[in-house]
């Protein structure tokens, strides 16, 4: 009987041109979204390449200048610009800290349109307070980016609603439901079979189109097969959730117009209202401290350190005897005083930065607690994690830049205090930044979460009454 149902359903969908509509719509949407996402990644790579090329040109000039200095040639360069001085390298020629895109970054723009992907931390300035945000078009931020995440989370459910809202009610309106009710099988079983058949067809077409789009428009999409598999499972689970809702609405309401309105209302609630509400609650309960206030307090701490410069320097040399050994005959200047006070500066500003980070973590924890209220939130976070464009990824990138900044200073400061010059050999051995993706995707947890929500919805709404739904009630 199930095989007959498959044949009947496929014929019905062919005659209604739904298979063609589904294939054409998903093909256009997925192809354009993949193309657009890949273009964003290419722009990101282009910006990085320009910055890297500029750094390479400067490095070539520095190497040539260092060779001339080592050969004893006279250079028409001021002392404060000689690359043989450690602080000239540390301030004027810092290394580039680049956050390279992941293989599947084209899937979701995430936070990549808000934050920069390369920084050059110097030995001077408060690198922990660097601004990582970029100037972007506010209109684009308002409407977002047309990427695969947008198509999957927002548009696919609408297509599913159009595909399933009258699965049962259409049979009732055409008068064929009475004939089906006369058959020796339960109407609910027949409906579940129809929903399963449509789910398999819909998911199969969607995934085939997705893989085709990645193969055509993405250069490195299939280089990360574990995440591609995770993406497939996430989409299958998310589609399954919406088909479960369609099944429940068809059984409970069984009227085409009411079914459509109910499913659209659920779409608005799950995709738009719940995520916005949870985000607003997080901002209200855990507001972040004023950045302007933090900057003003940092300036006050700097002023206080300047007034106590001699005391700070003496304490610094006592706690760093390896630097004080060769500093007896060394004239202490601006840079020596600066690095002596920088440690004090960081210690005093830690509580300010910690307060800012704590509030952000509280907001994130609140979202994580309520993310399972809406599968749309789960999908957005999951797709951002796969793409490497989530808030967590950029926060971790900031941490890695700060860690590299400390490494950069710790490499050059001893050279300053020991009055050691930069040579071409030392320049080639300078520390380099390498970004590492340290954020876990948790794909299986997210897939399990969406599947669990679907099962819970089934148990709550139609679990016990599934077999009790009589044909008479469906015909009313």
Image (cartoon, helix red, strand yellow):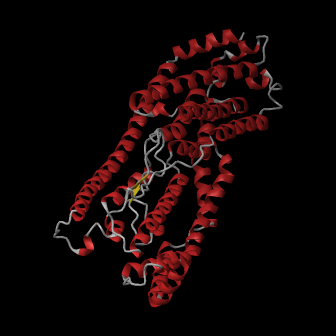
Say which of 41 and 249 sits in front: 41
Say which of 172 and 382 sits in front: 382
**Coordinates of residue 116 in the picture (x, y in percent):** 41, 56
Q: Quadrant of residue 10?
A: top right
Say which of 184 and 321 sits in front: 321
Query: Could you tell me which quadrant the N terminus lies in?
Result: top right
Query: Could you tell me which quadrant the C terminus lies in?
Result: top right
Q: Say if 54 sits above or below 145 in the image.
A: below
For residue 69, side relative to residue 204 (left or right): left
For residue 334, side relative to residue 325 (left or right): left
Q: Quadrant of residue 327?
A: bottom left
Q: Give the total of numbered labels.
A: 0
Q: Residue at x 37, y 58 (%)?
A: 95
For residue 3, side relative to residue 460 (left or right): left
**Coordinates of residue 354 in the picture (x, y in percent):** 59, 70
For residue 406, side relative to residue 335 (left or right): right
**Coordinates of residue 144 in the picture (x, y in percent):** 44, 49
Q: Residue at x 44, y 24 (%)?
A: 24
Q: Residue at x 47, y 32 (%)?
A: 223
Q: Say if 460 sits above or below 282 in the image.
A: above
**Coordinates of residue 282 in the picture (x, y in percent):** 62, 61
């Amino acid at each position: 009987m199930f095989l007959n149902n498959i044949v009947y359903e496929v014929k019905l969908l062919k005659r209604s041109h739904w298979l063609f509509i589904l294939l054409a719509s998903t093909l256009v949407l997925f192809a354009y979204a993949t193309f657009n996402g890949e273009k964003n990644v290419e722009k990101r790579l282009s910006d990085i390449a320009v910055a890297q090329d500029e750094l390479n040109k400067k490095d070539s000039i520095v190497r040539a200048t260092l060779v001339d200095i080592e050969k004893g040639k006279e250079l028409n360069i001021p002392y404060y610009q000689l690359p043989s001085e450690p602080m000239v390298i540390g301030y004027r020629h810092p290394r580039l800290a680049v956050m390279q895109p992941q293989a599947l970054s084209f899937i979701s723009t995430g936070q990549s349109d808000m934050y920069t992907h390369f920084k050059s931390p110097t030995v001077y300035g408060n690198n922990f307070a660097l601004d990582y945000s970029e100037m972007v078009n506010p209109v684009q931020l308002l409407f977002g980016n047309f990427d695969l995440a947008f198509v999957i989370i927002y548009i696919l459910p609408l297509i599913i609603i159009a595909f399933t809202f009258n699965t049962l009610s259409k049979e009732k309106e055409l008068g064929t439901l009475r004939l089906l009710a006369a058959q020796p099988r339960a109407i609910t079983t027949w409906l579940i079979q129809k929903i399963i058949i449509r789910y398999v067809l819909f998911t199969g077409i969607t995934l085939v189109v997705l893989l085709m789009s990645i193969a055509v428009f993405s250069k490195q999409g299939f280089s990360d097969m574990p995440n591609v598999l995770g993406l497939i499972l996430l989409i299958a689970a998310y589609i399954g959730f919406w088909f479960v809702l369609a099944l429940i609405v068809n059984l409970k309401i069984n009227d085409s117009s009411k079914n459509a309105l109910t499913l659209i209302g659920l779409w608005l609630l799950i995709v738009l209202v719940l995520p916005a509400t949870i985000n607003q609650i997080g901002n209200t309960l855990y507001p972040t401290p004023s950045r302007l206030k933090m900057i003003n307090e940092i300036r006050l701490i700097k002023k206080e350190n300047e007034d106590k410069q001699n005391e700070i320097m003496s304490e610094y040399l006592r706690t760093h005897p390896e630097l004080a050994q060769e500093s007896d005959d060394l004239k202490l200047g601006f840079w020596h005083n600066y690095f002596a006070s920088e440690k004090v500066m960081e210690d005093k500003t830690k509580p300010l930065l910690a307060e800012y980070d704590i509030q952000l973590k509280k907001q994130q924890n609140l979202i994580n607690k309520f993310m399972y209220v809406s599968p749309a939130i789960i999908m957005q976070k999951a797709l951002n994690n796969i793409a490497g464009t989530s808030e967590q990824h950029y926060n971790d990138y900031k941490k890695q830049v700060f860690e590299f900044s400390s490494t950069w200073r710790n490499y050059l400061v001893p050279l300053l205090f020991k009055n050691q010059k930069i040579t071409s050999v030392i320049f080639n051995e300078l520390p380099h930044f390498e970004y590492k993706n340290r954020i876990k995707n948790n794909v299986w947890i997210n897939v399990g979460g969406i599947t669990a929500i679907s099962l819970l919805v089934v148990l709550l709404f139609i679990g016990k009454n599934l077999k009790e739904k009589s044909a008479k009630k469906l015909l009313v």
